[in-house]
Every structure is written in C-alpha cells, then in structure tokens.
Image (cartoon, coloured by chain):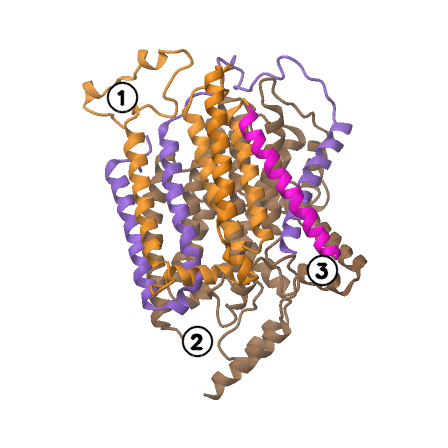
Amino acid sequence: MTATSLTYFAIAAAQGAFKNVTVSERTAQAFADGSWILAIVYIVVALGGLAALVTLSGLVLIYVERKLAAHFQCRLGPMRVGWHGIFQTVADAVKLLLKEDVIPEKADKAMHLLAPFLSMMATVMVLGVLPYSPILQITDINIGVLFVTAVSGFGVMGILLGGWSSNNKWSMVGAMRAGAQIISYEISATLALLVVVLFSGSLSLAEIVQSQDAGWWIWRANGVGFVSFIIFVIAVTAEINRTPFDIPEGESELAAGFHTEYSGLRFSFFFLAEFINMFVVSGMTATLFLGGWMPFHIGAWAGFNGFMDLIPPVLWFTGKTSVVIFLIMWFRWTFPRLRVDQLMYLEWKVLLPIGFVNLFAAAVVVLYNLYPFPILVP
Amino acid sequence: MIASAIYTVLFYAIAAGTILLALAVVNTRKLLRAAVALMGALSTTAGLYAMLDAQFLAGVQVLVYVGGIVVLIVFAIMLTRSGELLEDNPTLKRKLVGAVISIGFLVSSVGAVWGSPFAIASAGKAPANDALMIGKALLDYGPGGFVVPFEVISLLLLAAMLGGIVIARKTPPTGQPFTSGGDLPGEAEVYHPLSQRDDETGGRAS
Amino acid sequence: MNLLFVISFVCLAAGMVGGGLVFSFLVAPHRPGAIKNTPYECGEQPIGQAWIQFNVGYYLFGLMFLVFDVEAAFLYPWAVAFRQMGTVGLIEAGLFILVLLVGLAYAWKKGVLEWV
C-alpha cells in the first residue's frame, strides 16, 4: 500500500510541477490583466516561434532524409556545403527561391496559387496545437484530436486542387490517387486514435499526455494500444504519401504526381509541407502513444524516475518524435512501393476490420479494467 | 470592453466571409472553384460555431464537410466530363420559378429561425467540455436521452452507403482503369483491350 | 482565445506563402515562353485537356469514406463519455458499429472494395 500511495504522491507533485500553461492561456491572462503589450508580445512570439519551427524542421528533416538515405545505401550523401553538408538544404532553399516560377498556360491560376497555401495551412495549424512540453504549447484546444484530424482535410484539398489546377494529366492522376489514398487511410488513423481517446477520456492533446503519467498508452493499454500504434503508424505513413505508399507521386509512373507543374518556391511549399507533415504525424504518434513529453518511468522506482525527470520534457518530446521519424524514413528503404489495388486491399480489407475489432476490444478493456500489467491503475 | 469589441469585429468578419464565399459558390462557372468556395464557406461557418463555444460542432463541421463532403464533391466533379459549366441563358419562366423558390425558402427558413425557442439563450453558456456532454446525451437511454436517434443514424448511414453503391455500380462502362472515356465523344466505345471484354474472356483477366 | 490563435495560424500560413512568393517574384527571373508553359508530359505533345472523366471507383471510395467519417464523428463523443456510461455504452456503440459493418460487408461482397 505504501508503494502505491507514494506513487500517488509523486504523481500529484509531478502534476503540480508540470502544470500545463499554454501560450494562449498566458495571453488570455495578460489580456485580463490589461497589459496589452504583453499579450501582443506573446502572440508575436508564438507565431514567430511557429514560423521558425516550420522553417527549421523543414530544413533539418530534408537534410536528415538525404543523409539517412545515403547511409542506408552506403553512400555519403551531401558533403560539400559546410561540415558534412549541413548547409546543403539551405543552399537548396536559396536555389529554389531564385528559380523561375513557371505557371502552365492552361492552368487555373488562382487555384494554382491557393493549393500550396492550403497544404501549408493544414500543417501550420496542427503544429500550433501539439504539446511540446507542459509549458510549451501554443494553444490547447479541448477538441484537440478532432481538430488535428479535421484540419488534415485542408491538406487533402490542397493536393486535389494542386493537381486539378495544373491541367496536366500526371498531376490529375496523382492528385486523384493521393485523395483516394489519404481519405481511405484516415479512417484507420481515426479508429486507432479513438482507442487512445477511450483510454484517456479526453480529446485535448495536453490531457491525453497527462493521462499517460502512469505509463504510455502503447503498453499500458495492453495489447490494444500496441495494435493501434501499429495501425496508426501505417495509416499516417500512407496519409503523408511516404514510401511504401508513395503511389500518388511515384516518380517512375507519374513524373512527380500532383506537383509536376509546380516549380520554384511554389513547389518548395508543397515539398516543405510534406516534410513537416512527417514531423507532425510523428509528433502526434509520440503524443498519443508514446507519452508526449512525459519522461520514461518504471513503476515506483523513485531513483530511476527522478533521474529521468532531470531530462527536460521538450527533449523527451523531440526524442520520441525523432524515433518515429527515423522509423518512417527507414520504411522508405525497406519496403517496395505498393500497387494501387494492394493499397486499397490493405486499408479496406485488412486495417479497417482490425481497427474496428481493436476498438471494440479497447472498450472492453476500459470497461472491465483489464490491466494484466498493472503499472498503476489510478 | 475591448474584448467584446474584438468579438463583434471577428463575428462580422467571419459572417461577411461566409456570405461572400457562398455567393462565389453560385456565381463561378468552374465547378471546382465552386467546390473550393464551398469549402471556404463551410469552414467559416465552423468559425461561427467556435465563436459560440460549440467547439465540438465546429470540429465536426470541418471534419465531415471539408474533409468528407467537399472531397466527395471533387470526386463527383471528376466523374463529369466538363470542367466548366456551359454558358446558359435561362428563359424568363425559369428565372421566375427560381426566384419564387429561393424567396420561398428564404421566408420559410427565416420564419423557422425566428419562431423556434433556442434553449441556449435561456440556459446561458455552453458547457466547457461539450464533447463529453454530447457523448452522455447520445448514450443516455432515459428521458431526454438520444440513444434512439443515435442508433437510427447508423441505419441512415447504412442506407446511404448501400444506395450509393447500388446507384454508382450501375454506371456503364465498368472495367476501364482510371479514365472511362477518351478525349473525343464515342472514343470510349471504339476501343476495348481484349482483356477487358466480358464476352470473350468471361470477365476481366487481371 | 483558441479561435483567435487558430485564425492567426491561418494568417501565418498565408503570410509565409504570400511573403515567400512576393520575395521570389522580386528576385527570380521571369521569362515565360509558349513551349515552357505547355503542360509537361515528358516531351510528348499534350493531346486534349487533362480535365477528363475519372473512374467511378474514386467516387465510391469517397462515399464509403464519408460514411465512416460521419460515423467517427459520432464515435468521438462516445469515446470521451464511455468511462462514465459503462456497459450500456459498449452495447450501444457495438450495435452502431455492427450496422455499419453490415454495409462494409455488402460493399466487400459487391466488389466495391476491389480497385479496378
């Protein structure tokens, strides 16, 4: 009994220390106190930080992808620009900025411009609600998970619109395939994250992270958590059009898919959105299944847990996200590209039934409190 | 004071955006542009819901309408052959009928909104965790619960799915990958690869 | 306050895309040509429009998705409230899902889930 009560005490203390304060709450507080300048400073800092995150994570991820790809293939990758080529992506960004922005003659020009904006918008909106640490979250929406799933719809529209407005056959086919693929796999992703919602009883991302203080859902939700983790990773890999699900832009079949007719900076926005989406879905996976910024704890082992608490939460979040990103990049050099019919088979005849059964099993586990590995049952 | 002023300004901005986008939906000649404008109008409506603290409803609005229905509309547009509506000069009779119907709809909907008592006005603020309250109300089988509508909705969705499948499967020609027609009228009927002719191979060889 | 931030995210995205394009417009060359502006088809002459009629399969998958999407919209509040409702919630949601799985089974049987 003492061990359990000690753990309760530790959790209560930790919750006090890790009390969630989002930037939006600070802004509201400053607003209520009448200090206008402070509120505006908060908003500007939040948006500036978000813009910096978008740019930096894009640059870093593209570099990491190229380096990883090279080393998987026993190459060196970019080596010339800076130490081990770390400024390669910066050079590429400058190059894209200086490239001519070619708009095809038959294109629908306004829609051609709107499409990259929609893609970027969907990405930025999700980045803004992810909990990076207890005190580092721009805004915590109380329908968080639903919000994330919902705004990804703008990304789908961005891709469909980009393909349609180009008036190019490759773009068209790529966009249609991308649309069909993303919406199909969204169902499985939703079913997988509903399992987490069932366990945590909340849609808010910050509360979902808080609910994992006694163990991350990937193992604490015995079995069902792990199954939904697998389903979620497969589904989000398909949703961001990464190999083995890169049929929409399979370069050997469709030139470049939906962004064939995009060049210069417009292309780079699509490209950037795609790479940041990888960060976004990995961050979501970490938040939902791997405890977000929660440190790794083993039961009531105070010494170990105390040591783990020394690592700042933001590093925990970044570390977990990086692991998932590495996993997704690893997929690319492991699995061959699926055919369209295999893709649809996998989703509708394999993942979807498993997802439904898994959701039902999760409900049973929650209902009867079946926790065979009781790390802690609050 | 200033907070409420911001609220008011935001409301009028979003409302004006909704109306402008809705006008764009009916005035554009390109079907896909209409779909995009519709997406915008539906998202700004979600903004209005969020302003009323109905956050869950706003989320569902974006999830279902932007992520589902607009995408479905885009796929439906891709089923049609023309990217643009043809220039069309409606006769006076059609204009009159259209005007009568739309004015009638306006009158009836305004009347319905005007005449219905809104519980929210008397009950005060919306609950903070509206998803939880909606969930409880949906699963509640006692008086005031919505379990029967909840179950009926699944039947409705089933009917929609079956109906859609039955109607769409009838559309000829089947068995052609990706494009069911050529660029010229009648081209689709001219050429069928041997493997796709049902009469000779007894079904498609895959 | 949340809504304000969400709107500011949209503005941020618009600012990034718009600002980037304006800057690029200022520094990048701009020499359009008739051949450069034709749709890219790997060197072939484009024939006809790209806005053609697509397979009905896309529409069917879109329809199926919509049904499951609406269903998910109802499952979100169910999942949130489930802990407080108990067995009743399990039975009701089980019935709800089962009815939709009948639809999935029908689609499976009819071959809608096969990609042409």
Colour assigned to chain B in the rendering is orange
Image quarter for residue A21? Answer: bottom right
Residue interval drawn in magenta:
B1-28
Residue under circle 2?
Answer: A377
Numbered badge on residue A44: none
Please, what secondary structure does the residue beneath circle 1 have?
Answer: helix
Packing grade of label 1 (10 A; few <14, some 14-19, many >=20) is some
Q: Which numbered disc covers residue A27? A: 3
- Chain that appears purple: C
Task: Determine if the magenta segment contains residue B21.
Answer: yes
Report the Cα–Cα distance between label 1 and label 2: 60 Å
Question: Can you tell which of label 1 and label 2 is closer to the viewer?
Answer: 2
Residue B196 is marked as 1
Query: In the current view of this chain or complex, which residue is farthest to the bottom?
Result: A2
Depth check: give the residue in front, A122 or A267: A122
Give the residue displayed 56% in from the left and 80% down from the top: A10
What amino acid is labelled 3 in the image? Thr
Local secondary structure at mark 2: loop
In the displayed structure, would residue A323 be above or below residue A54? below
Chain letter matching colour brown: A
Quarter holding the N terminus of chain C is: bottom right
The residue nearer to you, when weighing C88 against A156, is C88
Disc 2 vs disc 3: which is toward the camera? Answer: 3
Inter-mark Cα distance, 2 to 3: 36 Å
